[in-house]
Image (cartoon, rainbow, N blue to C red):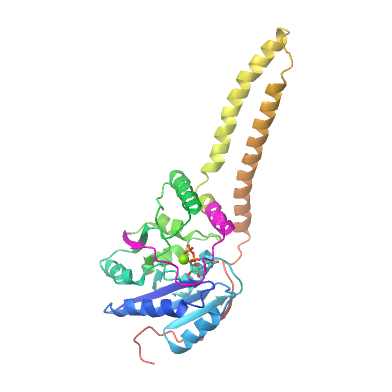
């Protein structure tokens, strides 16, 4: 008998969380020899999501909900879910049915075959605006070049075996990038293609600002290459400065040093901008160090539904 915890981060999904749970139950009900339970993490929703989750928990002994004390972001909600799974294999999916439950039986079957990480990859990206597509595309391009891991079309739709979850928990960073960190872990992996569905109801909880922050977090948590780029830029600039300095001095010696304002201004602009960029990049990493050394918890749980600790199919 295999055991599975279905971890779902929930942020303002009151309208559809019950539907999502029902759809997952229907899909997993087809899998024989499987016991599962739900772990719903309410990421500080402002609508009636928590009431909806509490109601579901009352009806279903194999469903447990926890509410974070505020909106910590999806990454933190995922951490909370994985921590609560207590050493069981985890299936991670979104609450909005954009991760279609009908591929679940395939994922479970692959997991049974012995794969430790079954990853959903997007075949189409659903309805996304051109600007979002461009931004996402360039973000993945940079991240792949710098870190050497491929994330394009990756998603947080994943089934992780218990040993992978245990290994993941040993990664100590307080600001996580789930997709990247699970790629870093390795293990036997397989991908399952899925088409991103339409959002059932409500709207995406990601703002442009949140996405940019995730992108910066992802890059700075995965590679320190930007820091080395700064050094290399500095080196090039030093060579350039050497050539230009020699020329300037030669002119001076030959009494040819006329109004070199153009050069001065160009140099000022160039050096000024590069210095500021470099400082900014260093600042990003220092901010990360600052965040990490504080050792704050990744999330804070405000309340939880009464736990029965039962899986589906177990008698009351
Ligand atoms: N989510 C969350 N906290 C947030 C934003 C989103 O827990 O601050 C959850 C949300 O409820 C959903 C999943 O993360 O289950 C994916 O969010 P969404 O559908 O808004 O993102 P998208 O599909 O646009 O990437
Ligand atoms: Mg979505």
For the question of whether residue 307 can be seen, the reply is no
Q: Residue at the spot x=54%, y=66% of the render?
A: 205
Pinpoint residue 92: horizontal percent, then vertical percent. Answer: 42, 69
Asked if 278 appears above or below 265 in the picture, the reply is below
Q: Which residues are magenta?
A: 188-217
Residue 9 visible in this rendered orientation of the protein: yes
* Residue 82: percent from left, percent from top: 46, 70
Quadrant of the frame with the C terminus: bottom left
- Coordinates of residue 255 in the picture (x, y in percent): 73, 8
- Left or right, 233 with respect to 268, comes to left
Q: Any magenta on residue 189?
A: yes
| Residue 3 higher or lower than 212, as above or below | below
Residue 209 belongs to magenta span: yes
* Quadrant (top left/top right/bottom left/bottom right) for the N terminus: bottom left
Which residue is drawn at the image coordinates 46% and 77% (left, top)?
Answer: 17
Q: Position of residue 80 (x, y in %)?
A: 51, 71
What residue sits 38% from the left and 83% below the top?
Answer: 311
Give the answer, above or below, for where 209 lies relative to 285.
Answer: below
In the image, residue 63 sits, relative to residue 72, either above or below, namely below
Q: Residue furthest top?
A: 254
Closer to the camera in the image, 189 or 289: 189
Residue under the point 51% across and 82% down: 52
């Amino acid at each position: 008998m295999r055991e599975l915890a279905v971890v779902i981060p929930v942020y303002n999904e009151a309208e559809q969380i019950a539907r999502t749970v029902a759809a997952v139950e229907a899909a997993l009900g087809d899998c024989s020899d499987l016991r599962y339970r739900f772990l719903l993490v309410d990421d500080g929703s402002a609508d009636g999501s928590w009431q909806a989750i509490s109601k579901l928990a009352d009806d279903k002994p194999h469903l447990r909900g926890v509410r974070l004390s505020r909106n910590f972001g999806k990454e933190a909600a995922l951490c909370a879910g994985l921590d609560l799974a207590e050493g069981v294999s985890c299936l991670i999916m979104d609450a909005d049915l954009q991760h279609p439950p009908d591929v679940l039986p395939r994922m479970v079957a692959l997991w049974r075959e012995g794969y430790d990480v079954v990853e959903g990859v997007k075949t189409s990206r659903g309805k996304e605006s051109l600007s979002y597509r461009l931004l996402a595309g360039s973000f993945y391009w940079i991240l792949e070049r710098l870190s050497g891991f491929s994330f394009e079309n990756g998603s947080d739709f994943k089934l992780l075996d218990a040993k992978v979850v245990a290994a993941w928990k040993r990664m100590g960073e307080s600001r996580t990038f789930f997709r990247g960190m699970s790629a870093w872990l390795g293990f036997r992996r397989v991908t399952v293609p899925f088409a991103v569905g339409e959002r059932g109801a409500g709207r995406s909880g990601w703002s442009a600002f949140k996405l940019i922050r995730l992108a910066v977090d992802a890059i700075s948590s995965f590679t320190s290459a930007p820091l080395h780029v700064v050094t290399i830029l500095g080196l090039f600039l030093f060579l350039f400065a050497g050539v230009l300095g020699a020329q300037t001095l030669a002119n001076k010696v030959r009494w040819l040093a006329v109004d070199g304002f153009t050069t001065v201004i160009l140099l000022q602009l160039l050096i000024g901008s590069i210095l500021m960029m470099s400082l900014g990049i260093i600042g990003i990493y220092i901010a990360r160090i600052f965040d990490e050394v504080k050792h704050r918890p990744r999330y804070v749980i405000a309340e939880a539904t009464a736990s029965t600790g039962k899986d589906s199919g177990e008698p009351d």
